[in-house]
Image (tube, rainbow, N blue to C red):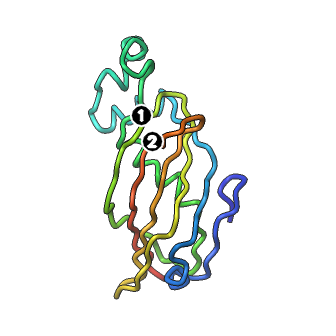
Amino acid sequence: MSAGNRTALAFASPDELVDAVGTPIGPGDWFTIDQTRIDAFAAATDDHQWIHVDVERAAAGPFGAPIAHGFLTLSLLTALATPLLDVGGLAMGVNYGFEKVRFLQPVTAGSRVRAVGTIAGAERTGTGVRVTQELTVEIEGSERPALVAQWVTLLVPA
C-alpha cells in the first residue's frame, strides 16, 4: 500500500505491531489546508471565529492570514497518518482517543502539512491490539510543528 508516493509500513496482522514499538513512521505526503476546508470545518463545528473565516480581518490580524482550527488540524490525522501503516487482517480500526495533544504553531490557510512519528506502544487486549502513535504534524517551511499528539487506536483483527 502506498500513501501517495510514499510506501506505508506493512504488517500482516495487528499482532505484528507489538514487536514494532519504537519503529519510525512517515513522513507522509504533504496535504494542503485551504480556506475552503477551514470554512467547511467552521460550518460543521459552529466555530466561526474571525481568525479562521474572515479573510480580510485575519490578514490584518496577529497571524497575517486566516488560520486553521487546531481541531481541524488534529482531525486530519486520519488522512495524514492512517496511510502510513498498512495492517492486514483487520476487521476495523477504532479511534480510541488521545493521551496528549499540544498545538504548537498555527497553520495559515494554504499551508501544507504532513505527519511523521513513531509507534510508541502496542498491547494486546481482549478485542485486538491497542496502538499508540506519537505523531508530529509538520508545516512545510516552518521550524515549529503545528501539533504533537499521542494517538491511540484499537486495531480489531478480522
Q: Who's the residue at 58% across and 60% down the image?
A: 83
Within 10 Å of disc 1 (Cα), the crowding (few <14, some 14-19, many 20+) is: some
Q: Who's the residue at 52% across and 52% down the image?
A: 79
Q: Residue furthest bottom?
A: 126
Name the residue beneath numbered marker 2.
146
Is residue 42 toward the left or the right of residue 131 in the image?
A: left
- Whether residue 125 is visible, yes or no, is yes
Task: Tell which of 80 and 149 is nearer to you.
Answer: 149
Q: Residue furthest front?
A: 143
Residues tagged 2 and 1 counted as in contact (Cβ below 8 A): yes
Q: Is residue 88 above or below residue 80?
A: below
Task: Find the distance from the CA under tag 2 to the CA under tag 1.
Answer: 6 Å
| Residue 100 point in image, percent of width and height | 32, 58
Is residue 82 toward the left or the right of residue 149 in the image?
A: right
Q: Amino acid at mark 1?
A: Pro
| Mark 2 vs 1, N-terminal side | 1
Q: Amino acid at mark 2?
A: Ala
Task: Tell which of 117 and 53 is nearer to you.
Answer: 117
Q: Which mark is residue 106?
A: 1
| Residue 21 point in image, percent of width and height | 51, 76
Within 10 Å of disc 2 (Cα), the crowding (few <14, some 14-19, many 20+) is: many
**Element type where label 2 sits in the image:** loop
